[in-house]
Amino acid sequence: MPVTLEETTSGQWNLSLRGPLTIYEVAEVQSTLKPLTSPESLTIDLQGIDEIDTAGLQLLLALHHWLGENLHLVRHSSPVIELIDLFQLASVFGDDIALPQH
């Protein structure tokens, strides 16, 4: 899974994920994030996620628990939207979810 983490300004981080976010990839994402001790903000671009399972969702929930309102999920892919909707967690994350145009 291609994972890109970059600091845009001091304490402001962007994480971009591509491919599946399942039990098999979560450890890689966690390793990428391990050096972040106290980011002011983390924005995760979810557009490239083509598959997500409950382990991927648990990772997003753990990051939300850690960062609270300083976690921003953007450009949700259809699989991410479907799983968030299935577990009725949209209000937990609090980010706007733009539904894809058909």
Image: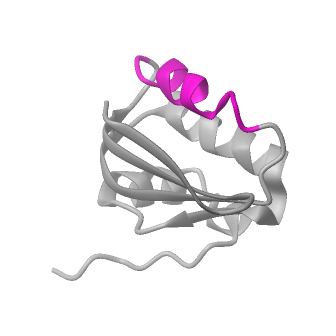
Residue drawn at point x = 62 percent, y = 66 percent:
90
Give the quarter of the figure containing the N terminus: top left
Circle count: 0
On the image, the x and y values in percent for residue 64 come to 74, 50
Looking at the image, residue 51 lies above or below residue 85: above
Using the image as rendered, state which of residue 37 and residue 52 is in the foreground.
37
Q: Residue furthest left?
A: 102
Looking at the image, residue 73 lies above or below residue 6: below
Q: Which residues are magenta?
A: 24-36
On the image, the x and y values in percent for residue 29 come to 51, 30
User: Residue 81 lies in magenta, yes or no?
Assistant: no
**Rendered image quadrant of residue 36:** top right
Query: Going by the image, does 30 lie left or right of 97?
Result: right
**Rendered image quadrant of residue 58:** top right
Looking at the image, residue 57 lies above or below residue 90: above
Residue drawn at point x = 84 percent, y = 45 percent:
38
Query: Going by the image, does 7 lie left or right of 21?
Result: right
Using the image as rendered, state which of residue 39 and residue 85 is in the foreground.
39
User: Residue 28 lies in magenta, yes or no?
Assistant: yes
**Rendered image quadrant of residue 45:** bottom left
On the image, the x and y values in percent for residue 9 come to 65, 66
Secondary structure mostly seen in the magenta stretch:
helix
Residue drawn at point x = 48 percent, y = 22 percent:
28
On the image, the x and y values in percent for residue 51 come to 31, 40
Give the quarter of the figure containing the C terminus: bottom left
